[in-house]
Image (cartoon, grey):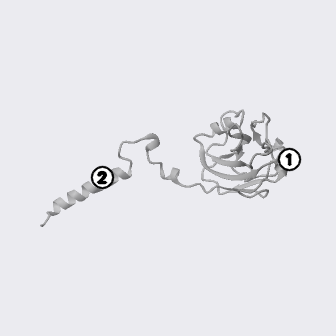
Amino acid sequence: MIVPLATLRSTAAAALAVLALGGCGGSGQSGKNALPSPAARQPSSLYMSSSGFTEGQTLPAEYTCDGAGRSPPLAWNDAPQNTHSFALLVEDADAPKGTFRHWGVYDIPATTHELAAGAAKNGGSGLRQTKNDFGTTGYGPPCPPKGDRPHRYRFRLMALDIAQLAGSPSDAKALLDATDGHVLGSAELTALYGRS
C-alpha cells in the first residue's frame, strides 16, 4: 500500500506536536506538578567537611557537653552560582521529644568558606547566631541522655540567594523557616555521639 507524501507529513507533524506538548508540561499542570526549570534541576555541588570529625563517625568529646563544648571546625567549597550568603543548622535527629536544634548561624558572607573550631564562642567577629533549643544563643553542645544509643547530629549548610535574611530569626527553627524559598543548594555532615 502506498501512502501519499502529504499524509506522511501530516502524521509526522501531529506526532511532533504531541511530543512537544508532553515535553513542555502541556497537560495544563502548574505549581508543584510543573516541570522545574533546568537551573532548578541541577544538583548542588556544595561540599562540606570538618577536620574535627568525619561523616558518620563519633563526634569527639571536646565538641560536646563532656568536653570543652566548643563548636567544631567546618569548611566548604563549590557553592552554587548566585550564592549570596550561607546559613548553618545543627540538629539532633534522635532527641527524645523530636528534632532538637543545637546551633543556628545565618548571614554568613558568600566569601566565607570555613568556621574555625570554637567560632560560636568567638561570635564577636560578626557571626550572627540564633538561640538554640537549650534557650541560649550560639552553639549548644550535644549532650544526649546517658544510656541512649548514639544520637545523630546533622550539620546542614545552606547556600542562599540572598545576602541577609529578613529580620533576625529568634531561634534555629525560625532560621529554617526564613530560608524557605532561598536555598540554592545544601551540604550535610552527620556525626554520632552517645554517653554511657
Mark pair 1, 2: CA separation: 64 Å
Badge 1 crowding class, 10 Å Cα cut-off, few under 14, some 14 to 19, many 20 or more, is few
Could you tell me how many numbered marks the image carries? 2
Residue 95 locus on image (x, y percent):
72, 41
Residue 160 locus on image (x, y percent):
63, 45
Q: SS class of the residue under badge 1? A: loop
Q: Residue at x 63, y 42 (%)?
A: 162
Which mark is on residue 66? 1
Specify the amino acid type for callout 2.
Val
Quarter of the image for residue 78 reads bottom right
Tell whether label 2 touches label 1 (CB within 8 Å). no
The vertical placement of 20 against 31, above or below, is below
Relative depth, front residue between 101 and 14:
101
Q: Check the image and name the residue furthest to the right.
A: 68
Q: Residue at x 72, y 32 (%)?
A: 170
Residue 128 locus on image (x, y percent):
75, 40
Q: Nearer the viewer, mark 1 or mark 2?
A: 1
Relative depth, front residue between 178 and 132:
132
The vertical placement of 185 against 134, above or below, is below
Of label 1 and label 2, which has the lower sequence position? 2
Placement of the N terminus among the 4 image quadrants: bottom left
Q: Residue at x 83, y 41 (%)?
A: 124
Q: Check the image and name the residue furthest to the front.
A: 147
| Residue located beneath label 2 in the image | 18
Specify the amino acid type for callout 1.
Asp
